[in-house]
Image (spheres, rainbow, N blue to C red):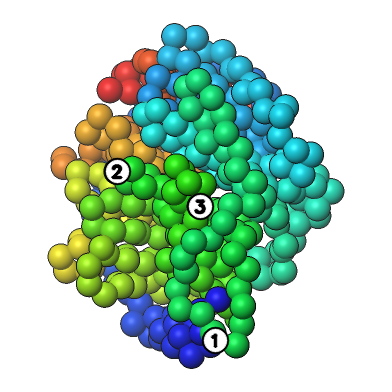
Amino acid sequence: MIGKALFFAFTLMINSLASSAEELSEIPVTQLKITSQSIKLSKISDVLGRSITSAKTQLIINDGRNLWRMSVNAHVMKRINLNFLPEEANWFSTVCATTTSLFVAVSDYPEKQKIEELAKSRGDFVRGPSAKGFLTILPASIKYTNSPTITSRPPTDPQTTPENIFTYEIQSCSWHNSTMYFGSYGALGKVNLSTSTVDLIEEDEAQSLSRVPLIADKDGLWYAIDSGGLEGASLVNKPITGGTLYYSISNGEDIISYTSLVKHHGQLIIGTTHGLFILNQGTRKLKRINFGLPLQNEFISSLLSYNNYLWVFAGGGLLKVDLINSTAIFFSLPPQSNWFAGSPLNKSWILLSTDGIWKGELKTSPN
């Protein structure tokens, strides 16, 4: 655990962000020119997917209890056989993919506990899943690592003796080069898949912070920190060299949280509960993207940079955004379901909703 003095300094820094945050109403706005197109939908499955991850020629869908594969040539879901896992390894929280492998965080999350905690309000105590280990899925093999060992961590309080077993629930992950970085409730670190060990970069003590979403690139790590209460959230850039940078948006008493991050044409695109933003890393200033549409809400649930376009799931619809020309195509989706994520597969899209998994055929191809 980090020392108390370090933690309190960190807490003071977080609390000071509110006064230095950019006001939502004062952030410059770019208006997109929008056209609308239809999308042809056909249902694939009643499975309620939680996330969808692109892995070379296949997609991986995670419904929490199972992992499903879909190949480019066949829009058929096939469950990955994980019957060898112990009984307490029953929940898959986060999936990251490279061209050759998958990393999956594995936890124990009994169904009764999950249902009870889903009914709680923001700020209420939620124990959540209990971390058990992780899966490494290769083309010809699957390896399960139970209770991985922590090999390095930040300076600790000399009066404490921290455990060397990794027990943090991984919330987000991102590959860069050959390193898998993760964000969790209480820690930030990286996984050495060859040794099945964990190195911690940050570790909380008195107040644990969520670290989701997260991406890793040549500029270092980008991730959001959130106490889970009423203090709001901040965006963090921890570069490879130099000091850590913090960004936040203020909107009075209304809490703005970060929901998704992606690099697109060298720019950091930020999805939030209150719309879409672009960060100018040179000036450290934000610009807001206005769709000018009667969306159900401005909640950005998912972002994807694909074939020169930015794809945005926002307010119940899918947008294909051309930031260079400030234009976008809006594909309206049925309002009876919450459409929150998707990924291109061959010449169509696989879409996740609260009503199941769908195939979407656009009037224009995803390219």
- The percent coordinates of residue 343 (x first, y second) are 43, 29
Q: Residue at x 33, y 43 (%)?
A: 178
Q: Amino acid at mark 1?
A: Pro
- The percent coordinates of residue 108 (x first, y second) are 73, 48
Dots 1, 2 in contact, CB < 8 A: no
Q: Is residue 139 above or below residue 286?
A: above
Q: Residue at x 61, y 30 (%)?
A: 67
Q: Could you classify mark 3 by the number of other residues whose Cα lies within 10 Å: few (under 14), some (14-19), or many (20 or more)?
A: some
Q: Could you classify mark 1 by the number of other residues whose Cα lies within 10 Å: few (under 14), some (14-19), or many (20 or more)?
A: few
In the picture provided, is 188 more to the left or to the right than 168?
left
Residue behind mark 3: 197
Extreme residue in the right direction: 112
Q: Amino acid at mark 3?
A: Thr
**Where is residue 90, by image quadrant?**
top right
In the picture provided, is 242 more to the left or to the right than 247?
left
Q: Earlier in the sequence, mark 1 or mark 2?
A: 1
Note whether residue 49 is visible.
no
Work out which quarter of the rendered image holds the C terminus and state it. Answer: top left
Work out which quarter of the rendered image holds the N terminus and state it. Answer: bottom right
Secondary structure type for disc 1: loop
Camera-side residue: 111 or 336? 111
Camera-side residue: 171 or 234? 171
Secondary structure type for disc 2: loop
- The percent coordinates of residue 6 (x first, y second) are 46, 85
Question: Residue 158's mark?
Answer: 1
The CA span between labels 2 and 3 is 18 Å
Q: Residue at x 53, y 60 (%)?
A: 150
